[in-house]
Image (spheres, rainbow, N blue to C red):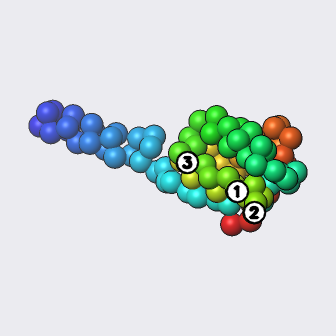
Amino acid sequence: MKFALAALALLASAAFGGDAFSAERTVMLMVENMTCDLCAPTVRKSLARIDGVIRVEVSAEKETATVTFDDAKTDASALTAATKNAGYPSRVVR
């Protein structure tokens, strides 16, 4: 009986612990001041440095950044803060 309760507690902890409720999200940011191809690497690096960011695609031509991230580790406000700190203010468009 004690073994069964211990096993059940272990399974519950694994199922409901930390990352069990995290989800992968993707947002598109409209990025200001990104006027040339040399700006894109700076924006990409500022976003990629954030813990939880999985993938970053930047288009200088469209002035956008598409970011996929783990929402248990970061959020859209952290992404916009990172681009702003790099000199490229941004806002979520979708």
Cβ atoms at labels 1 and 2 below 8 Å apart: yes
Distance from label 1 to label 2 (Cα)? 5 Å
Seen from the viewer's position, the closer of residues 62 and 18 is 62
**Circle 3 sits on which residue?**
55
Label 2 vs label 3, nearer the camera: 2
Label 3 vs label 1, nearer the camera: 1
Instruction: Provide the secondary structure element on which disc 3 rests.
Output: strand
Q: At 53% from the left edge and 45% from the top edge, which residue is drawn?
A: 54
Q: Specify few, some or many for label 2: CA neighbours under 10 Å numbering under 14, 14-19, or 20 or more.
A: few
**Amino acid type, callout 2:** Lys
From the image, which quarter does the N terminus lie in? Answer: top left
Q: At 44% from the left edge and 43% from the top edge, which residue is drawn?
A: 19
From the image, which quarter does the C terminus lie in? Answer: bottom right
Q: Specify few, some or many for label 3: CA neighbours under 10 Å numbering under 14, 14-19, or 20 or more.
A: few
Which quadrant would residue 64 be assigned to in this image?
bottom right
Q: Position of residue 17 (x, y in %)?
A: 41, 41
Q: Position of residue 5 (x, y in %)?
A: 20, 38
Q: Position of residue 7 (x, y in %)?
A: 20, 37
Cβ atoms at labels 3 and 1 below 8 Å apart: no
Q: Which mark is residue 62?
A: 2
Instruction: Provide the secondary structure element on which disc 1 rests.
Output: strand
Seen from the viewer's position, the closer of residues 22 and 86 is 86
**Circle 1 sits on which residue?**
59
